[in-house]
Image (tube, rainbow, N blue to C red):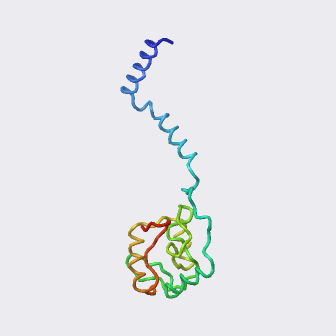
Amino acid sequence: MSIEQTLSLLAFLAGAVLEHPWALMPLVLAVLVGIVVTSPAGGACESRDPRRAFTSAERQEAFSRAGLRCEHKPLLWSRCTNTPTQGDHIYPWARGGRTAMSNQQALCAFHNSRKSGTVPTRMYIYRLQLRRRRYFPEEASPQVEWRSGAAL
């Protein structure tokens, strides 16, 4: 194929696309499907903390910091009164959250299962940090730090 033939074919294709942009839909759809298929499953992160679970001592420390109460608080009501039984990653481990005390909250089984692997909003973290100032011991920082050296 000569250069002139190639240029005329490209001009024809460009004209066809300009007249009928919907003709690109199959190509766009194929690219989107390719992106979804090749992306990590479930929003997984490549840089996960090698340690998945909090130790028993870390969980007990988080429970005592929380005053032996679940740290969940709905927007309009008061804080949950249940006893915490689970140490939860505030920013999920599966999404790159580290397994550290600054990324742990004490939750009851109900609220931990409800939160599951959802990524918290900035407002949720801000409200949690404000609440923690009231009940955390003075020597414990209320800041949520979910990755090494960075706070939300």
Residue 85 appears left or right of 17: right
Please state, as top left, top right, bottom left or bottom right, where the C terminus lies in the image.
bottom left
Q: How many marks?
A: 0
Residue 79 appears left or right of 117: left
Q: Which sits in the foreground, 110 or 37?
A: 37
Q: Which sits in the foreground, 144 or 122?
A: 144
Residue 123 at x, y percent in the picture: 38, 69
Is 49 placed above or below 41 here?
below
Q: Residue drawn 63% across and 80% down?
A: 56
| Snapshot quadrant of residue 122 | bottom left
**Residue sticking out furthest to the front:** 149
Residue 148 at x, y percent in the picture: 50, 66
Q: Residue drawn 43% across and 68% down?
A: 151
Q: Residue drawn 41% across and 77% down?
A: 129
Q: Residue drawn 57% across and 52% down?
A: 40
Residue 57 at x, y percent in the picture: 61, 82
Residue 84 at x, y percent in the picture: 55, 82
Is 20 placed above or below 121 here?
above
Residue 118 appears left or right of 19: right
Is 32 placed above or below 6 here?
below
